[in-house]
Image (cartoon, coloured by chain):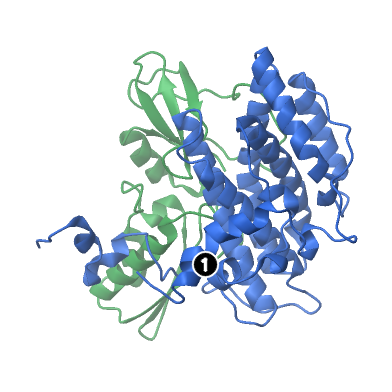
Chain colours: A blue, B green
Amino acid sequence: MSFDNVYEAITEEQDDSRWAFGTGFADPLSGVDATVPAGVTADECLALGDDALIMSHRLQEWVTRAPELEDEVALANIGLDLLGQARLLLTRAGQIDGSGRGEDDFAFLRDEHEFRNVRLVELDDGHFGHLVARLFVFGVWRLALLRRLLDATDPVLAAIAAKAVKELGYHREYAAGWVVRLGDGTDLSHQRMQEGLDATWPYVPELFQGPERAEFDEVVDQVLAAATLHRPDGGAVGAVGGRAGRDGVHTERMGFLLADLQSVARAHPGATW
Amino acid sequence: MVTARAVAASVTDPELPMLTLADLGVLRAVDETGGRVVVSITPTYSGCPAMDTMRDDLVHALTDAGYADVEVRTVLHPAWTSDWISEHGRRALAAAGIAPPGPAPAGPVPLTLGRPRRGLTCPRCGCADTEELSRFGATACRALWRCRSCAEPFEHVKEI
């Protein structure tokens, strides 16, 4: 076996199963019973799948930019967990809505107004304090939210939530650890961490439609007290005619994010490699 | 002919090759009816990229063993836990220098701040004076630790 270059070697047809790259991955729900119970809509899977997909994309942007190698690995791993959750949830959304759309159709071929993620996940991070604040809020909120779905009517959603809850416990702990380390650190790190919280907090009210606010507040208060930080008291960022992220109304950052995420897939529809 | 169960159980994890899929606890069922084999596996982490490789490796191993009709199915429920790693698997991990997981937490995990509560035994020198360097490691399921006695870093399969 000799090849002119390494790429030829890894694309050799008979042996490509060794390599987890390119297209043609198996459906992440392959073999799972696709029956949809009466009354179940795709809304929940779509919303939670979009949250995970967009947050994962923002975390991937930190790869090569994190302050330490260990944190780069941590952020990449958290992003990978969320991407996995997104694949499962979006695939399930395509089963429920009967459209037959797969994960790639949802991720790459929808326009901005069709995305149902909360605006918190699409914000770009000016500095590490912004990222930590966002990841902390996201982790505490999503863990509380998915815990409620362990007994969801849709058994597939319940099973995805059961797996995700275990992963999110690790994400929340990582982010909370950094909130304390920066908040209770030097004057500069304290200031940066508070800036991150201040920038994130206007997007917090949008997150809550259910009863998980109490758990969120309890965990946040515990961590902020240990970090010697204060909870920002500014108002919420406005909705547009009463509509926000869950209704497909996003911030100006979302268009740039989607251009980055989708441009290759759209320039070469159906391409495989 | 080797049974389909035996073939599937001997396929190893692509990232932890000292473990078979049976040792890792991801192999949930192997059903063989009339020449058709249905293998059920369960993901360790939602985003584990090794799942596709496991799927392919299972199909290849069974096809090579003479089973022409093979299907690999995903089972999500109940979710995988590190408690399903077999005793044999735990010994194989330790022998390869990877600290095996302790018991997985049962039920909701409260947030803890500060250092983890439990020390690990260094798989190289056996010393208990160890520290966690990073909760996240080279793959989703591993953390990075260091032994304060022999000063060597080592990996640890996380409890989940």
Q: Which residue position is annotated with label 1?
A: A28
For this orientation, the residue located farthest to the bottom is B34
**Quadrant holding the C terminus of chain A:** bottom left
Q: Position of residue A181 (x, y in %)?
A: 64, 21
Three-letter code for the amino acid on which mark 1 is drawn:
Pro
A44 or A111, which is in the foreground? A111
Q: Is residue B105 visible?
A: no
> What residue is rendered at 76% in x and 69% in y?
A43
For this orientation, the residue located farthest to the left is A2
Q: The residue tagged with tag 1: helix, strand or loop?
A: loop
> What residue is rendered at 88% in x and 35% in y?
A234
Q: Is residue B85 above or below residue A92?
A: above
Tell me where residue A169 sits by quadrant.
top right
Q: Is residue A136 above or below residue A85?
A: above
Q: Is residue B84 left or right of residue A272?
A: right
A236 or A38, which is in the foreground? A236
Q: Is residue B44 above or below residue B107?
A: below
